[in-house]
Amino acid sequence: MDFRIGEKVVYPNHGIGIIEEVSSKSVNGASEEFYMLRIHANASLVMVPKANTKSVGLRRIIKKSEVEGLFNLLKEDFFEPEADWKGRFKDHSEKMRTGSIFHVAEVLKNLVYLSHKKSLSFREKRMLDRAKQLIISEVATVRGLNEKSVEEQIDRMLSEAYLRSVKASD
């Protein structure tokens, strides 16, 4: 997948970035091309080898038309996640690494649900915050909105879904 300078992309677990440059560097005596990516959240510069874009999960931001599908996923009823902490954390970590906003939304939903049932471990709380921020920043970018209004909208969806799940289990 080729990206252009100035294009907004998503780097898994880091969020939105902008391709600032495409450069060639010598690595082990061979010339290799890299995307120079400026991460929006912290202004850090990341070098991603062009040959590895697929394996690291670098992707274009979602289209406006895909936001509704993402919101529908967030609005769906909750379900009981895996009980084993280690297995659940491994599964969530793998989903976060894929870079798919839909997988990140699944992680967010599972962790929000669990946070209502019991207190999360430090690592799960950090993952919940990260998943939420990744979704907020991408939706805000796609829709041209401020992050606070998107966060409020997402919180409302998740709260309504949780309340429906609680009522359904009564």
Image (spheres, grey):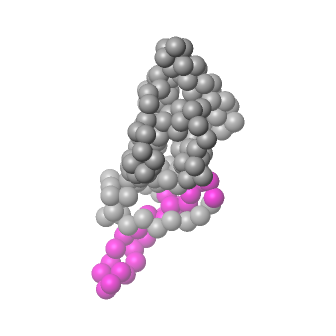
**Above or below — where is 39 with respect to 28?**
above
Q: Residue most toward the bottom?
A: 29
Is residue 139 at least partly visible in the picture? no
Q: Is residue 100 left or right of residue 55?
A: right
Where is residue 59? Give x, y as percent: 40, 49
Q: Residue at x 52, y 39 (%)?
A: 111
Q: Position of residue 142 (x, y in %)?
A: 54, 37
User: Where residue 166 sits in the image (x, y, percent)?
Assistant: 54, 19
Can you tell which quarter of the image residue 58 is in?
Answer: bottom left
Q: Quadrant of residue 53?
A: bottom left
> Which residue is depicted at the point 44% across and 27% down?
79
Does residue 166 lie above or below 129 as drawn?
above
Q: Is residue 113 left or right of residue 89?
A: right
| Residue at 40% across, 77% down | 25
Residue 11 in sight from this viewpoint: yes
Vertically, is 30 above or below 67?
below
Number of numbered tags placed on the structure image: 0
Q: For the point 33% across and 55% down, which residue is it?
A: 54
Position of residue 13 measured from the top left corner of the image (x, y, whole percent): 49, 53
Asked if the magenta segment contains residue 41, the reply would be yes
Q: Nearer the viewer, residue 126 or 131?
A: 126
Secondary structure mostly seen in magenta is strand
Magenta span of residues: 17-42
Residue 122 in magenta? no
